[in-house]
Amino acid sequence: MQFPNPVFVALDTPDLPRALALAESVKPYVGGLKVGLEFISALGPDAVARVVEIGLPVFADVKFHDIPNTVAGAAKAIAGLGVAIFNVHASGGEAMMRAAADAIAPWTPRPLLIAVTVLTSLDDSVLATVGQRPPASEQVGRLAALTKASGLDGVVCSAHELATVRAAAGRDFLTIVPGIRPAGAAKGDQRRVMTPSEARAAGANILVIGRPITAAPDPAAAARAIAEELGV
């Protein structure tokens, strides 16, 4: 599964006018938009619908993780806003993931449903402190296989685990990769990172890029430079 332009820019701000202005400025150079927990918690569902109206695919990075019935209800609510993609935590288990998938089955078009494997802010040392068995790559493989068995469309993973995901779930499984940093950019709070061209070459379908674009002096120019690097 490939997207002509794999870059989804992260609009992680509680300022709706700024988010909409950013989205419009980078629209010619990106393939989609991502709204996350900060945006949705501060601005609510109406703001998500405003972003959808811009006309690019929208990834709602909600990371639902709760009992199956609660996640099913939340899945219906977010799908009703017209987003193209949303996610849950794979560590919520098969019953939870299946409940989310079943809840949105009647939608036409149906949003893509993906699961978070291991957050890119975590590494092996952090995994051990929260009771997950390292190395991170093995945990990603386990959760990718569980996600596919649960009927979902793909996973969020680090670019460093793309080969592991392909081995566990096949080449048609959607991969969304955060922690993308152009050469020379600061890593911030991400630990397992890769450049856009490296991640694309490794087989990533969607590249989520936030601060290297949104915090740049000229976000449109930053997005254009990444698009040129990728040849899209």
Image (spheres, rainbow, N blue to C red):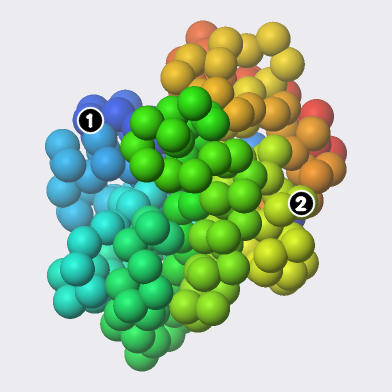
The kind of secondary structure element at disc 2 is: helix
User: What residue did someone put label 1 on?
Assistant: 14
* Relative horizontal placement of residue 129, taking residue 162 as reference (left or right): left
Q: Which of marks 2 and 1 is nearer the N terminus?
A: 1
Residue 17, quarter of the rendered image: top left
Residue under the point 55% across and 50% down: 139
Residue 165, relative to residue 197: is it above or below? below
The image shows residue 12 at horizontal and vertical percentages of 35, 32
- Asked if one can make out residue 232 in the rendered structure from this viewpoint, the answer is no
Residue in the foreground of this view, choosing between 174 and 29 = 174
Residue plotted at (38% across, 49% down): 61
Q: Residues within 10 Å of mark 2 (few under 14, many from 20)?
A: some
Q: What's the mark number on residue 163?
A: 2
The residue nearer to you, when weighing 80 against 64, is 64
Label 1 secondary element: loop
- How far separated are the C-alphas under marks 2 and 1? 35 Å
Report if residue 140 is visible in the image.
yes
The residue under the point 51% across, 9% down is: 217
**Residue 33 or 162: which is nearer the viewer?**
162
| Numbered-mark total | 2
Vertical side of 148 occupied by 59: above or below? above
- Where 142 falls versus 129 (above or below)? below
* Neighbourhood count class around disc 1 (C-alpha, 10 Å): few under 14, some 14–19, many 20 upward: some
Image location (x, y in percent) of residue 120: 51, 34
Q: Position of residue 25 (x, y in %)?
A: 50, 31
Q: Nearer the viewer, mark 2 or mark 1?
A: 2
Q: Can you tell which quarter of the image residue 36 is in?
A: top left
